[in-house]
Image (spheres, rainbow, N blue to C red):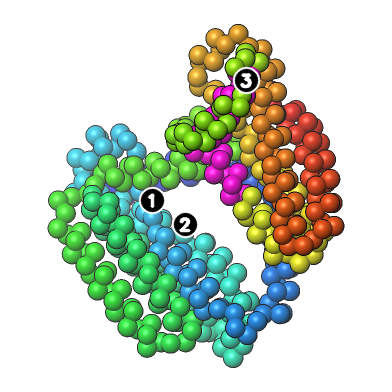
Amino acid sequence: MFNSHEFYKKRLSAHMKELGRYMRYILNGHMVVVMFFLISATAFYYQQWLEQLPDNFPTALVIGVSLGLLISYSPVRTLLQEPDLVFIIVAEDKMNAYFRNSIIYSFVVQLYLILLLVAAFSPLYFAAFPERTGMGYLLILAIMLLFKVGNLIANWWMLKVRETRIRQIDLFARTVLNIAIFYFIIQGSLLFAGIITVLFVLLFLYDFSTSNKQAGIAWDLLVEKDQNRMQSFYRFANMFAEVPHLRNRTKKRQWLVSLISNRIPFAKKHTYDFLFRIAFIRSGDYLGMYIRLIIIGGVFIYLIPNEWMKVLFGLLFIYLSSFQMMPLYQHFRTNIWLDLYPVDSATKRDAVLKIIHQLSIVHVIIYALLFIVIQEYLGFVVFIVAGCLFSIAFINGYIKSKLV
């Protein structure tokens, strides 16, 4: 007899083994050192900033928006796979325990984000509201957990609805209500928080009613969403190790492709120059990661008061950016037809080193211009020199030795 609870335990065990397999590569020595440095430096300057917290700083708005967004983001990890559309769908009426366990697992996995954010905001909360007690803040945490459960359940109900627009409107409405509730709670306006909570309950009941009107579970939608999340993890893990399960996503970005490809000479020695630039632009991994790292590093440079720490953080994010571009070398590993190219293998490695070097120089120039914007002229000169030297040494030393 089919037991969906036991089936879920087996599926979860296989899932955890798959995650652990790649987490060993992600949490390597490089990343641990970088994360330790980032957390330590951020905590130090965060504490310094709190000592000079302006009286008019919108603490309630910042914390309310952050908590509301985190609570609203409540995906349900079902761990379903494509074969389930054929072999398990026939047992839909026996899958209640499986989906109940999925919601519990999703809550537990997302719980650590809540605890991290609550812990991160606690110094700001008590600095802005010194008259409040720790019990009041713990009560906010309890309310967060309650709303997290509510959003998970509501999201599960709406996954039975196939119309994308209806799900998007529902998510937007719940997000706005969540933000408003926690804003008024942090602000101390409990009456308004209670009124918005009533509206949230009405929306929660509407989701329940809408779910009951559906014919059944949208299995294909559940499989698609779970696979998309797993592919996101694989794309991240691919920055550290080769992932055979990764499905490369491509985007047209025709104007950007034309802008880059027109500047590459039509010659055999530039074959891989063309391929890797197209891959960098059109792939769903590299361009987005590169831009995000530039933005995050720029925020650190802008906010950190110490000029030398700005330079150090800039070099750190150049290192991260260059390191994350290394998987470009293996991007076409599954395309056998590339072996037919009458091009030496060394040309491939040189093309990757060339594009990584160019991207790092662009990174250096952007941060150097940021130093000018914030009127740190000594930092501009130091960073230009240090950034170029670091890029050359890191790319020709470490990265070149790893591209084999």
Identify the element where label 1 is drawn: loop
Q: Is residue 319 magenta?
A: no
Q: Nearer the viewer, residue 196 or 287?
A: 287
Question: Looking at the picture, which amino acid does disc 2 mark?
Answer: Val
Residue at screen point 30% across, 34% down: 83
Between marks 1 and 3, how big is the CA–CA gap?
A: 47 Å
Residue lying farthest bottom?
Answer: 131
Q: Are marks 1 and 2 in contact (CB under 8 Å)?
A: yes
Identify the element where label 3 is drawn: loop
Tell me the quarter of the picture where residue 333 sits. Answer: top right
Residue at screen point 52% across, 61% down: 112
Between marks 2 and 3, how big is the CA–CA gap?
A: 50 Å
Q: Main secondary structure of the magenta part?
A: helix
Q: Using residue 277 as the reference point, say whether residue 230 is left or right of it.
A: left
Q: Using residue 316 as the reference point, say whether residue 95 is left or right of it.
A: left
- Which residue position is annotated with label 2? 109
Q: Is residue 277 magenta?
A: yes
Residue at screen point 71% across, 56% down: 370
Q: Badge 3, how many Cα within 10 Å: few under 14, some, many 20+?
A: few
Is 242 located above or below residue 293 in the figure? Answer: above
Q: Position of residue 150 (x, y in %)?
A: 34, 67
- Which residue position is annotated with label 3? 265
Question: Looking at the picture, which amino acid does disc 3 mark?
Answer: Pro
Q: Which residues are magenta?
A: 270-293
Question: Looking at the picture, which amino acid does disc 1 mark?
Answer: Arg
Q: Earlier in the sequence, mark 1 or mark 2?
A: 1
Q: Are marks 2 and 3 in contact (CB under 8 Å)?
A: no
Q: Position of residue 19 (x, y in %)?
A: 51, 43
Marker disc for residue 160: none
Q: Position of residue 116 (x, y in %)?
A: 56, 65
Q: Nearer the viewer, residue 31 or 271?
A: 271
